[in-house]
Image: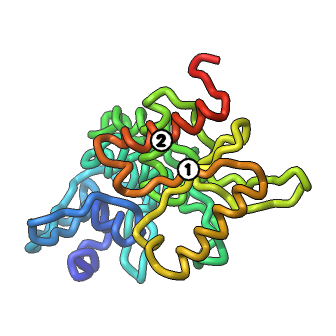
Amino acid sequence: MRPFIEVNERCAASHLTAAELLVLPRRQQKGTPEMYHVIRPEGSAHLNRPHVIVHRMKLYSDEVTTVDGVPVTTPERTWLDMAEMLTVDELVAMGDSCVRVPRPDFEDRDMPLCSLADLQRMIDRHKGKRGLRKAREAIKLIRVGSDSPQETLLRLAMVRAGLPEPELNVPIIGEDGLRHHEPDLSYRKYRIGIEYEGEHHGDGGQIVRDIARSENYHAVGWAEVRISKRHMLNDAKPAVAKIRAALIQAGWRKGY
């Protein structure tokens, strides 16, 4: 890919290739040879290379950044391009990842990759682009605060099932005014925290931390709902049922 871009200096890695370089959530391509995606702006030189998919379309100078010296479409432009390939939910998950506020203690940056306004600017700029209708639908569902695609998909399933929209990674403030941990998703009104437990929750150290977290929930008078991969089967219906039961027990009634 690098030699192709060097010869075609106005080109930039795009679509799935850009998403990989920018470490954005994307659907894994299985059973096919690895292909590299490149945007070749209108009017630039043409050049064929094996395993390179060339997209001929408009590309503005402020829509290109670099990763390890390779020109790559910016996160917001990559998000819009991926609307051609992803489902609405997958596009929301990618958008959530773009706008999330990173955690400086664990990451090498302290600013979001882009803002909701940046994503909207791409939609407004590229009228008539493939996937635009999907992008317009997805941007209405993007929220700042989701730390993983699984949290995004859980939130979307909850809302579509008629549950109230949860807050994302907001700290619990105890009655003593002290700040406690941040549930993945939560309902402050009903004192319910929802934790999505990925594969890493099976290791010894994480188990100890999870037990301490559960004890903390009890201490502040909150209920903890733990969701794992198995609850996300069948369009996350088991997860939704578990959360709905906790809400009803806490006094929630749909429509009230």
Is label 2 in a helix, a strand or a loop?
A: helix
Kindly identify which residue carries mark 2. 242
Task: Tell me where residue 143 sits by quadrant.
Answer: top right
- The spot of residue 223 in percent (x, y) is 65, 48
Task: Determine the residue located farthest toward the top in the rendered image.
Answer: 255
- Residue at 42 percent of width and 47 percent of height: 153
Is disc 1 placed on a helix, strand or loop? strand
- Left/right of residue 246 with respect to residue 187 in the rendered view: left
Residue depicted at x 66% and y 74%: 104
Kind of residue indicated by mark 1: Val
Are discs 1 and 2 less than 8 Å apart at CB? yes
Label drawn at residue 180: none
Which residue is tagged 1? 225
Distance Cα–Cα, label 1 vs label 2: 8 Å
Residue 133 placement (x, y as % from top left): 34, 32
Q: Tag 2: residue type?
A: Lys
The foreground one among 137 and 227 is 227
For residue 6, what is the image quadrant?
A: bottom left
Residue situated in front as seen by the camera: 196 or 248: 248
Q: Position of residue 39 (x, y in %)?
A: 27, 60
Instruction: Name which of mark 1 and mark 2 comes first in the sequence.
Output: 1
Q: Residue at x 53, y 35 (%)?
A: 245
